[in-house]
Image (cartoon, rainbow, N blue to C red):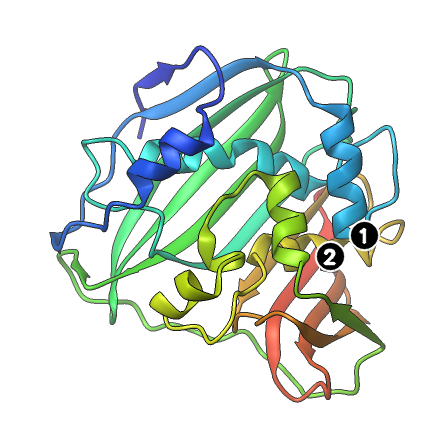
């Protein structure tokens, strides 16, 4: 369905946008904005990109990771759901899955037009689900697209919930162990500019039911994709399910298995018995 597009002068300041997002989702029937938000002429900050790559485990290259472009669109996620026409707020919503496609390699020097819309509002056994759909384009060519799916507990959407199918997982000994320091949430916050305090503050984390701060799911996604650098083509699709948060500090396992389409990977408990994140990565062609 076509969307009206609100053209913004620049990416929203995360402080103000996140302050609105901290207002709890209104109880009752879920509503999402019918318009998209768009920013043109976005110049990529090379120093920030280099710092992001170091924190997430990417090598420094002239081209950018798919997860970096998600980070650039994130202020539009927060702004869109902070709109007065939305009864859903991003803070408190659970990021359940993410899918992104690099349609071609994107150079760090390229200017981007970024756009995000909300769609797919649907019932879930625990509340409501919705998709935030983003695109990045260069001179009218879509070079990246992504879908972030969120669950908002306690809200209503007419209809019957669809059956939720879990991604398959077979426990296996990890190929690598990653030691995540207690300061990782702060380090990732500095490069992602995601100020959600559950990733850096113990009191805030406990208020949302976590014993300790949790690392951002998009860091885990980025670190898993970085582990496959050089093994997936420039044009690729990566799908992830966020299964269980990682409390900091932690030691987690990583495993990867080739399949007929590309690779399946998992970030797990250190013994490989339970997953934190499941990912598939394959050619986009």
Q: Quadrant of residue 138?
A: top right
* Residue 235 seen anywhere in this rendered image of the structure: no
Q: Name the residue at the left extreme.
A: 28
* Image position of 69 (left or right of 87): right
**Disc 2 packing (10 Å; few <14; some 14–19; many ≥20):** many
- Up the image or down, 253 lies above or below 208; here it is below
Residue 199 versus residue 121: which sits nearer the camera?
199
Q: Quadrant of the N terminus?
A: top left
Give me the C-alpha separation between circle 1 and circle 2.
Answer: 6 Å
Taking depth in this image into account, of 211 and 58 the one nearest to the observer is 211
Q: Are marks 1 and 2 in contact (CB under 8 Å)?
A: yes
Residue depicted at 88% across the width and 38% down the height: 60
The local crowd at label 1, few if under 14, some if 14 to 19, many if 20 or more residues have their Cα within 10 Å, is some
Q: Which type of secondary structure does the marked residue at label 2 adopt?
A: helix
| Quadrant of the snapshot with the C terminus | top right
Q: Is residue 8 above or below residue 77?
A: above
**Residue in the image at 63% along x and 41% along y:** 190
Residue 40 position within the rendered picture, expressed as x and y whole percent measured from the top left:
53, 13
Left or right relative to 264: residue 218: left
Image coordinates for residue 94, horizontal then vertical, percent = 39, 60
Which residue has dot 2 on it?
223
| x then y, percent, for residue 134 | 49, 34
Residue 221 in the image, given as x and y percentages of width and height: 65, 56
Disc 1 marks which residue?
57
Res 115 visible:
yes
Residue 21 found in image quarter: top left
Sequence-first disc among 1 and 2? 1
**Helix, strand or loop at mark 1:** loop
Left or right relative to 138: residue 2: left
Q: Residue 281 or 70: which is nearer the viewer?
A: 70
């Amino acid at each position: 369905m076509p969307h009206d597009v609100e053209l913004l002068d620049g990416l929203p300041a995360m402080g103000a946008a996140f302050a609105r997002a901290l207002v709890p989702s209104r109880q009752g029937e879920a509503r999402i904005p019918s318009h998209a938000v768009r920013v043109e002429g976005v110049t990529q900050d090379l120093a920030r990109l280099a710092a992001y790559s170091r924190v997430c485990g990417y090598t420094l290259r002239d081209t950018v990771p798919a997860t970096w472009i998600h980070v650039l669109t994130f202020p539009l996620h927060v702004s869109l759901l902070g709109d007065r026409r939305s009864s859903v707020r991003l803070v408190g919503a659970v990021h359940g899955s993410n899918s992104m496609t690099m349609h071609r390699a994107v150079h760090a020097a390229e200017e981007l037009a970024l756009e995000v819309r909300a769609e797919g509002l649907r019932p879930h056994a625990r509340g409501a689900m919705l998709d935030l759909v983003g695109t990045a384009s260069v001179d009218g060519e879509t070079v990246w697209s992504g879908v972030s799916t969120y669950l908002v507990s306690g809200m209503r959407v007419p209809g019957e919930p669809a059956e939720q199918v879990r991604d398959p997982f077979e426990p296996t000994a990890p190929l690598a162990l990653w030691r995540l320091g207690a300061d990782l949430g702060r380090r990732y916050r500095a490069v992602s500019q995601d100020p959600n305090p559950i990733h850096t503050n113990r009191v805030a984390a406990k208020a949302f039911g976590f014993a300790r701060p949790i690392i951002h799911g998009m860091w885990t996604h980025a670190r898993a994709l970085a582990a496959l650098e050089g093994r997936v083509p420039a044009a690729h699709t990566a799908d992830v399910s966020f299964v269980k948060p990682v409390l900091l500090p932690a030691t987690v396992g990583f495993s990867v298995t080739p399949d007929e389409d590309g690779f399946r990977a998992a970030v797990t408990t250190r013994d490989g018995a339970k997953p934190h994140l499941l990912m598939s990565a394959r050619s986009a062609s």
